Image (cartoon, grey):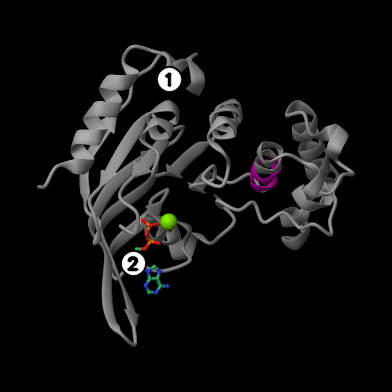
Amino acid sequence: MEKLMEISHVSYSYHTLEGETPALTNINFTVHKGDFLSIVGPSGCGKSTLLSLLTGLIEPEHGSILLYGQKLFEKGRGTIGYMLQHDHLFEWRTIEKNVLLGLEIQNRLTPENQEKVMDMLKRYGLYKFKDARPSQLSGGMRQRAALIRTLALEPELLLLDEPFSALDYQTRLTVGDDIGSIIKKEQKTAILVTHDLSEAVSLGNQVLVLSKRPATIKSIVPINFSDTMTPLQRRNAPEFKDYFNTIWKELNSDD
Ligand code: ADP
Ligand code: MG
C-alpha cells in the first residue's frame, strides 16, 4: 500500500510560564493509504498533541512529518480532516447548512460538490433531516452529520480525537459501528485516538500503544479480522479478547 504519512523522531514540549511540559518523545510510525490506525494511551499522555501535530496546527520541535513525502507545512491544509469529541455543529444553521459549511468557507461550494454532499446525506440517512437544527438530532446522528461535514472536504486523512466519548455507552457502540462503516465505504484513511481499548480493536487495523507522558510508542499491535466484518461483529469474534488483553498488558507494562 502507498505510504501516506511518515512520522519520524517526533518530539514536542509545551512551554508555559510555569515551565516546560514534555508531551511526546521520539515518535515513529507510518500510515499507509487505507489504514485505520487506533491510538490508545493513558489520559494526559499526549494523544491530542500528537493529532495536533499531524494536522499541522503545531510544528514538531524535533523530527519530521511527511505527507506523500512532502513536509506537512509545505503541503498545506485541506488534505486533512479533523473530527472531535464535540461535534461543533452550529445551532443557528440547518443540518444541510452545517455540512456545507467547510466547503463554503473554502470557497468550494460548486453544484457538483453540493450534490456529492447531498448524496452522502441520503446514503447515510440524514437527508430527511436536512432542514432540521442540530438540537433536533440524536447524539449519534449529530456525529454522523459532523463526519459528513468533514468528508465533504474530501480529506486524504481523517483524524478522530475521541469522537464518541461524549456519548453514552450504548450509543457509542452503534455510532462507532456506523462511523467505522462509513469511513470504510468511503475508502478513507483514518487515525482514531481513544482511551477505550475495545473501540480501538473494533475499528483499527493497527493499534498504537502510547506510554504515559511524555508519550513514547510502547508497541504497535496489528489487528487482523476478516475484511467484511463490521466493528460490532469484531467485538463478538473469539480473537477480540486476545487483542484486548495484549493491548491491556502493553498499556500497563512498566518498560
Ligand atoms: P491526551 O490527549 O492524551 O489526554 P494532551 O495531548 O491533551 O493529552 O496533553 C498532554 C500534556 O500536555 C498534558 O499534560 C497537558 O496538560 C499538556 N498540554 C496540553 N495542551 C497544552 C497547552 N496548550 N499548553 C501547555 N500544556 C498543554
Ligand atoms: Mg485528548
- Mostly what secondary structure, the magenta segment? helix
Left or right, residue 32 beside residue 27: right
Left or right, residue 144 beside residue 98: left
Residue at the extreme left: 255
Mark 2 surroundings: few (<14), some (14-19) or many (≥20) residues within 10 A: some
Q: Is residue 210 above or below residue 15?
A: above
Left or right, residue 170 beside residue 71: right
Please state the horizontal and vertical placement of residue 64, each as a whole percent of the image. Answer: 31, 60
Q: Quadrant of the N terminus?
A: top left
Mark 1 surroundings: few (<14), some (14-19) or many (≥20) residues within 10 A: some
The numbered dot on residue 204 is: none
Residue at the extreme right: 131
Q: Is residue 77 above or below residue 80?
A: below
**Tag 2 secondary structure:** loop
Left or right, residue 224 beside residue 56: left
Q: Residue at x 67, y 38 (%)?
A: 144
Q: Residue at x 43, y 20 (%)?
A: 235
Please state the horizontal and vertical placement of residue 36, each as a whole percent of the image. Answer: 43, 34
- 138 magenta-colored: no
**Tag 1 secondary structure:** helix
Instruction: Provide the residue span drawn in magenta.
Output: 145-152
The numbered dot on residue 60 is: 2
Residue ID for mark 1: 235
Picture quadrant of residue 49: bottom left
Asked whether 77 or 39 is in front, the reply is 39
* Tag 1–tag 2 contact (CB < 8 Å): no
Q: Residue at x 49, y 59 (%)?
A: 75
Asked whether 62 or 137 is in front, the reply is 137
Residue at the extreme bottom: 17
Q: Earlier in the sequence, mark 1 or mark 2?
A: 2
- The amino acid on which the numbered mark 1 sits, given as a three-letter code, is Arg
- The amino acid on which the numbered mark 2 sits, given as a three-letter code, is Pro
